[in-house]
Image (tube, grey):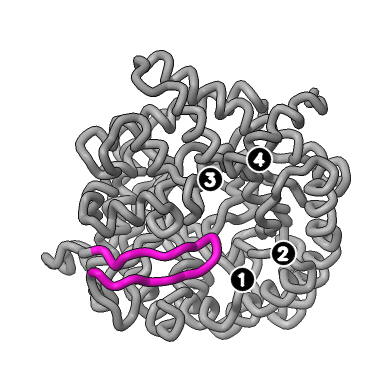
């Protein structure tokens, strides 16, 4: 059980070290909302979300007041909409109607984001899933807080290269339709391999089909807390360094556990998981990049960066797992360029390149995240980036993802500004050699030999 002494222990971390609970996320199953007509499906979706989540925001604010713990976002995830709309949606425009229903419902209950406008196509696309994917440019440009993801591969099934090739064109189209806002629509979309179905973080969050009717998931953060703790480890050996990170991750996760249990009790909805990811913000002192530099790097991207990140990720997970019986989601260290001050600086100076980021994704929580690239980057190149990350995830049995923003009208060295937690980012150069003949072959890359473990 958690007690008030643990809350008092976190006061310093909250007040001085930027500790926060990044999100309380309510997952809601919409499987029972499917109907014969798209209008009826939309009505059912709106009714269920506004019923289940009506007290989510007020409950989050009450917990903030009672315990003094900042809760940055309140969010909702729903069942992948390609499944919910499969029987009623006969066109991409029909799926867009559901996107608008999600947007209206989320705004009605006052949450910051809603995720689950998603499709799971790791082996092949159904007609409904293809329609949803093709609807993304319109859906993400016409809604404000709807987030989307597509899972294109898994260790068990391989990689659906037809979906990968299509997504390159879709991301370009999203960028063009939101060109007046630095192609912000792409911020709300991520392509996954081995996606978890209990992820409270956006844009990849959705309510998995293995979940119950509703669940409360909590995502904690705290790179600033880890960074401050590492001041004590300066000049010490790796054993001391690892123990410091592990103990700090334990304390951060306990805060998330307290919030999750309270939210579950007050809302009368079962507690699902704690995602103990170190999720940075653009604020000074709230940076995973700063943690890596305190470990001993002159700047993120220097030789040793991948090793330092691997160690950090592992110790965060080891500390967090001791603090909660239900750890899930992504869990570990995020490396989103635009949301991390030190990562932004390293990318701007040229020390951190796209190729180094790809190497780092082998050992971090997610993948190529929140990276701004030139607006004239080809669809095939974007598909190639997705394929590379999916391959890393597939072979290494881990989650990987790609959230890149080809900023329309901007080139290398210019800056894109996404605002708020999404931050800002320099446009990073991309290898110009063509991979079009590779990504347009069609079909599926088979699962690796070590996937056969039945």
Question: Does label 3 or label 4 sit earlier along the sequence?
Answer: 4
Residue position marked by numbered label 2 in the rendering: 111
Marks 2 & 1, CB-CB < 8 Å contact:
yes
**Horizontal relation, residue 110 to residue 13: left or right:** right
Asked if residue 39 lies in the magenta stretch, the reply is no
Residue position marked by numbered label 4 in the rendering: 14
Residue placed at 50% from the left, 62% from the top? 422
Q: Quadrant of residue 76?
A: bottom right
Residue position marked by numbered label 3 in the rendering: 196
Give coordinates of residue 157: x percent, y percent: 39, 46
Question: Does label 4 or label 2 sit earlier along the sequence?
Answer: 4
Residue placed at 67% from the left, 64% from the top? 112
Give coordinates of residue 395: x percent, y percent: 31, 39
Q: Disc 3 and disc 4: Cα gap in Å?
A: 29 Å
Highlighted magenta segment, given as a residue range: 413-428
Asked if residue 419 lies in the magenta stretch, the reply is yes
Residue 260 in view here: yes
């Amino acid at each position: 059980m958690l007690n008030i002494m643990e809350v008092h222990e976190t006061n310093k971390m909250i007040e001085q070290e930027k500790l926060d609970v990044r999100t309380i996320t309510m997952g809601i199953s919409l499987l029972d909302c499917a109907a014969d007509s798209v209008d009826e499906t939309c009505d059912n979706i709106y009714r269920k979300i506004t019923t289940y989540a009506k007290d989510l925001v007020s409950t989050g604010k009450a917990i903030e007041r009672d315990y003094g713990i900042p809760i940055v976002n309140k969010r909702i995830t729903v069942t992948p909409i390609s499944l919910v709309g499969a029987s009623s949606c006969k066109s991409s425009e029909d799926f867009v109607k559901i996107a608008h229903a999600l947007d209206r419902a989320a705004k009605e209950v006052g949450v910051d984001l809603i995720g689950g406008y998603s499709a799971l196509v790791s082996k092949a696309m159904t007609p409904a899933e293809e329609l949803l994917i093709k609807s993304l440019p319109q859906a993400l440009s016409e809604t404000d807080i709807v987030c989307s993801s597509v899972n294109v591969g898994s260790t068990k099934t391989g990689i659906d290269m037809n979906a990968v090739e299509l997504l390159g064109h879709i991301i370009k189209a999203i960028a063009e339709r939101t060109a007046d806002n630095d192609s912000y629509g792409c911020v709300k979309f991520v392509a996954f391999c081995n996606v978890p179905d209990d992820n409270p973080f956006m844009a990849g969050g959705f309510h998995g089909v293995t979940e119950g009717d509703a669940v409360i998931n909590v995502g904690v953060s705290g790179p600033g807390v880890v960074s401050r703790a590492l001041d004590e480890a300066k000049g010490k050996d790796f054993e001391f360094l690892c123990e410091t990170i592990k103990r700090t991750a334990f304390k951060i996760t306990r805060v998330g556990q307290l919030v999750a249990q309270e939210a579950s009790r007050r809302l009368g909805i079962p507690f699902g998981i704690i995602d103990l990811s170190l999720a940075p913000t653009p604020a000074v002192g709230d940076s995973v990049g700063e943690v890596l530099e305190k470990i001993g790097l002159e700047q993120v991207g220097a030789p040793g960066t991948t090793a330092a990140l691997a160690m950090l990720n592992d110790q965060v997970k080891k500390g967090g797992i001791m603090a909660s019986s239900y750890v899930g989601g992504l869990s570990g260290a995020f490396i989103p360029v635009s949301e991390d001050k030190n990562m932004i600086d390293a990318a701007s100076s040229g020390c951190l390149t796209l190729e180094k980021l790809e190497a780092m994704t082998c050992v971090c929580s997610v993948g190529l995240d929140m990276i701004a690239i030139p607006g004239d980057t080809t669809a095939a190149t974007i598909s190639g980036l997705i394929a590379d990350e999916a391959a890393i995830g597939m072979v290494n049995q881990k989650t990987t993802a790609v959230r890149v923003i080809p900023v329309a009208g901007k080139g290398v060295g210019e800056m894109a500004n996404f605002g708020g937690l999404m931050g800002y980012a320099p446009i990073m150069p991309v290898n110009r050699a063509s991979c079009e003949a590779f990504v347009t072959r069609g079909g599926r890359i088979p699962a690796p030999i070590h996937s056969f473990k039945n």
